[in-house]
Amino acid sequence: MAIELNDDLIGLQQAADDAHAEVIRLQEECGRPTREGGWTDEQHAAWNAAAAVWREKAGEAQQAVTEHAKATGQDRGKLEAAVKTAVRHPGQTGA
């Protein structure tokens, strides 16, 4: 059976990946928090806020994959892999 994706799953995963990219960007911009001098309170706050958004978006994407897999009788792992492939490597098939 071919994996069935929908735009909602793709959009949720893209939002999670975008939020993760923001966490990485902040880490690269601020450097290591354990370096001499560490991060400022503002840097910690910005990173914590971005990480919270990432966790929220990733959770939404995971929940949607779980629900879609149950509703369509698809293998959850294969569905998740196909969604991530569709977002991260457009044009490739993950099914």
Image: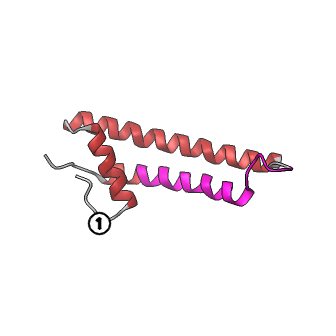
Q: Residue furthest top?
A: 70
Q: Residue furthest left?
A: 1
Q: Is residue 17 magenta?
A: yes
* Range of residues picked out in magenta: 12-36
Scheme of colours in the image: secondary structure
Q: Residue furthest right?
A: 37
The residue that appears at 34% across and 64% down in the rendered structure is 90
Using the image as rendered, state which of residue 76 and residue 28 is in the foreground. 28
Q: In the rendering, at what x and y percent does residue 29 appear?
A: 71, 60
Circle 1 is placed at which residue position? 91
Q: Secondary structure at mark 1?
A: loop
Q: In the rendering, at what x and y percent does residue 58 appear?
A: 48, 43
Q: Is residue 41 magenta?
A: no
Measured along the vertical axis of the image, is residue 60 above or below residue 21?
A: above
The residue that appears at 50% across and 44% down in the rendered structure is 57
Measured along the vertical axis of the image, is residue 17 above or below residue 68?
A: below
